Image (spheres, grey):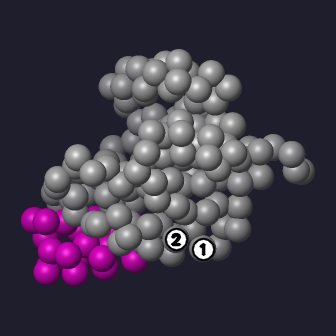
């Protein structure tokens, strides 16, 4: 089926985990193309993986999904979405706190770009506990994150922390 348009899944993915991957794959079923857009936030001083590392890791993860591409951006999300012809923003919801945050962001985006829809996808139950910050902390302390991230990410974390 074609004519379903382009969606943008904006995220920082530091690092990407099974929850992100699940949302992206599920969202891609509704669109001709899903762009996983990794935000290069110039104000975020503490990142584990630099933007190009995050893009490369995400590309490795999604390489067998031709309908999913990976890009980086450093502008307003709605401006980037419009520049690539996206008609929807995909957001993943894990816990109740996510809803309030995403609701505020979604309303602001709606004011900035009324034609751009925000679509929330509920995290699969098995991934609700996973967050990038938790993964970073566990990995930094030498813990096993293999149930939360693909092997390529586990390996990148081991190299980053020397564990």
Asked if disc 1 and disc 2 are in contact, CB closer than 8 Å, the reply is yes
Whole-percent x and y of residue 127? 42, 48
Residue picked out by circle 2? 59
In this view, which residue lies farthest toward the left?
141
Snapshot quadrant of residue 76: top left
Front residue of 114/126: it is 114
| Residue drawn at x 54%, y 55% as measured from the top left | 36
Position of residue 99 in the picture relative to residue 109 (left or right) = left
Residue 33's place in the image compared with 66, above or below, is above
Whole-percent x and y of residue 155? 31, 79
In this view, which residue lies farthest toward the right?
1
Position of residue 42 in the picture relative to residue 33 (left or right) = left
Tag 1: Cα neighbours inside 10 Å, few (<14), some, or many (≥20)?
few
Do we see residue 72 in this rendering? yes
SS state under label 1: loop
| Residue drawn at x 22%, y 81% as measured from the top left | 159
Tag 2: Cα neighbours inside 10 Å, few (<14), some, or many (≥20)?
some
Residue picked out by circle 1? 63
Q: Which residues are magenta?
A: 139-163
Q: CA distance from mark 1 to mark 2?
A: 6 Å
Residue 60's place in the image compared with 58, above or below, is below
Whole-percent x and y of residue 153? 36, 71
Q: Image quadrant for the C terminus?
A: bottom left
Whole-percent x and y of residue 48? 22, 63
């Amino acid at each position: 089926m074609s004519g379903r348009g382009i969606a943008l899944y904006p995220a920082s993915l530091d690092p990407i985990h099974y929850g992100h991957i699940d949302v992206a794959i599920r969202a891609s079923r509704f669109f001709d193309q899903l762009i996983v857009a990794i935000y290069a936030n110039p104000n975020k001083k503490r990142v584990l993986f630099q933007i190009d590392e995050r893009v490369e890791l995400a590309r490795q993860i999604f390489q067998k999904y031709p309908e999913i591409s990976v890009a980086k951006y450093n502008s307003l999300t709605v401006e980037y979405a419009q520049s690539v012809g996206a008609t929807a923003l995909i957001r993943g919801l894990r816990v109740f706190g996510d809803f309030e945050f995403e609701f505020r962001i979604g309303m602001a985006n709606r004011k900035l770009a009324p034609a751009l829809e925000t679509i929330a996808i509920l995290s699969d139950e098995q991934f609700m506990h996973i967050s990038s910050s938790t993964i970073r902390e566990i990995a930094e302390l030498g813990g096993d994150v293999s149930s939360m991230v693909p092997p390529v990410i586990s390996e990148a974390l081991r190299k980053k922390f020397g564990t």
